Image (tube, grey):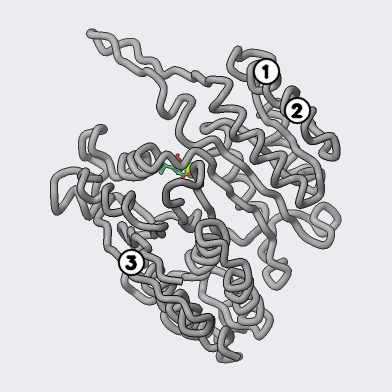
Amino acid sequence: MNKTIALIPGDGIGPDVIAEAVNVLNAVGKKFGHSFEYKNVIAGGCAIDKFGEPLPKDQLDIALNADSALLGAVGGPKWDDVAPEIRPEKALLGLRGGMKVYANLRPALMFKQLKAACPLKDEVVGDGLDILIVRELTGGIYFGERGTSEDGKTAWDTEKYTWAEIERIVRLGFESAKNRRKILTVVDKANILNSSRLWRKVAETVHAEYPEVTLNFLYVDNAAMQLVRNPKQFDVIATSNMFGDILSDEASQITGSIGMLASASLGDGTGPGLYEPIHGSAPDIAGKDLANPLATILSAAMLLRYDFKLEEEAKAIETAVEKVLDDGWRTGDIAGDVEAVKAAGKLVGTKKMGELVVEYLNK
Ligand code: IPM
Ligand code: MG
């Protein structure tokens, strides 16, 4: 298979982790007989520096013309004072909107090897955590009508959803749950918001097509509480853009594996998806060979699975990562007892971690 992949390294540790994901993709290509060609996209703070805007159209076009896209991270304190319309985050929203990747899959997984880092009690976590958040990504309050009054004393943003926008998310939620533990929880604020009541109506309607899946509804405040009180009740969560933003950070934190989590943003399948680690740009450790590349490497696995339908290859990456962890290799963020890991000779940097995944892939 010959495919082009747009690489969007972005800022901070983005370029560090993308470089390792590329090494792993090349190793997979070699092993399974595929060739990947890469096209670089400059987006985020680095694009503000270079072009005066976070996502010039020709850069977005590079991503749109590729078969898939892999992003590192964007943003950093360097751009804290730029005008709101050109903030680095606008690159992310521009990519999501421009690529029409409306569904954001954020798996919150606890790696059993990293259980010690999970902040919840053993009896709450049991044998592990595996929650999939399906977040709506190109609508709602992030993209709704907004404004500020002339005197600057009133400002508003609008949460607006159409039936169609909700249906494609809820449907993906049911489809995902069908292949997992068969529970879909729709999270909303239906006791207050009209738009949430529409989410419920759509979910109930689509549920008729998925009788094997149990459908639950939870208000977002309760869901935030339940995630720490009893996270094992969740299988798949489907929710709006902003609730998904908030709950996915919470869900990732309770796994204790935040440096490990990947994500996929998918559209209707006619264009490229956008894959990225869920962690940020960590500018303080950028370029120092300290960042954990595993979340980006696992995002590359999701890319192979969803955009190229290369399940075996995706699994091979995931298995290699598991084995690297099984053998005790750790970057600083997942080391736990750093001194002990160091003494055992298993504390590694970004590059070595990437090399290890390649090595275990070829074993
Ligand atoms: C995320 C981030 C972004 C979001 C920001 C950086 C715009 O928090 O991907 O979750 O709010 O979607
Ligand atoms: Mg977020």
> Do callouts 3 and 1 mark residues in contact (Cβ within 8 Å)?
no
Q: Residue at x 20, y 48 (%)?
A: 58
The quarter of the image holding the C terminus is bottom right
| SS under mark 3 | helix
Q: Of the residues under marks 3 and 1, which one precedes in the sequence? A: 3
Query: In the image, 191: left or right of 278?
Result: right
> Do callouts 1 and 2 mark residues in contact (Cβ within 8 Å)?
yes
The residue that disc 2 covers is 217
Mark 2 Cα within 10 Å, few/some/many (few <14, many 20+)? some
Examine the rendered structure and indicate whether residue 167 appears above or below residue 270: above
| x and y, in percent, of residue 66 in the image | 35, 57
Query: In the image, 71: left or right of 56?
Result: right
> Do callouts 2 and 3 mark residues in contact (Cβ within 8 Å)?
no
Q: 102 or 236, which lies in front?
A: 102
* Amino acid type, residue under disc 2 in the picture: Phe
* Amino acid type, residue under disc 3 in the picture: Pro
Query: In the image, 213: left or right of 238?
Result: right
The residue that disc 3 covers is 15
Alpha-carbon distance for marks 1 and 2? 9 Å
Q: Of the residues under marks 1 and 2, which one precedes in the sequence? A: 1
Q: Which mark is residue 171?
A: none
| SS under mark 2 | strand
Mark 3 Cα within 10 Å, few/some/many (few <14, many 20+)? many
* Amino acid type, residue under disc 1 in the picture: Ala
Q: 103 or 132, which lies in front?
A: 103
Alpha-carbon distance for marks 2 and 3? 40 Å
Q: Residue at x 67, y 48 (%)?
A: 132
Q: Which mark is residue 190?
A: 1
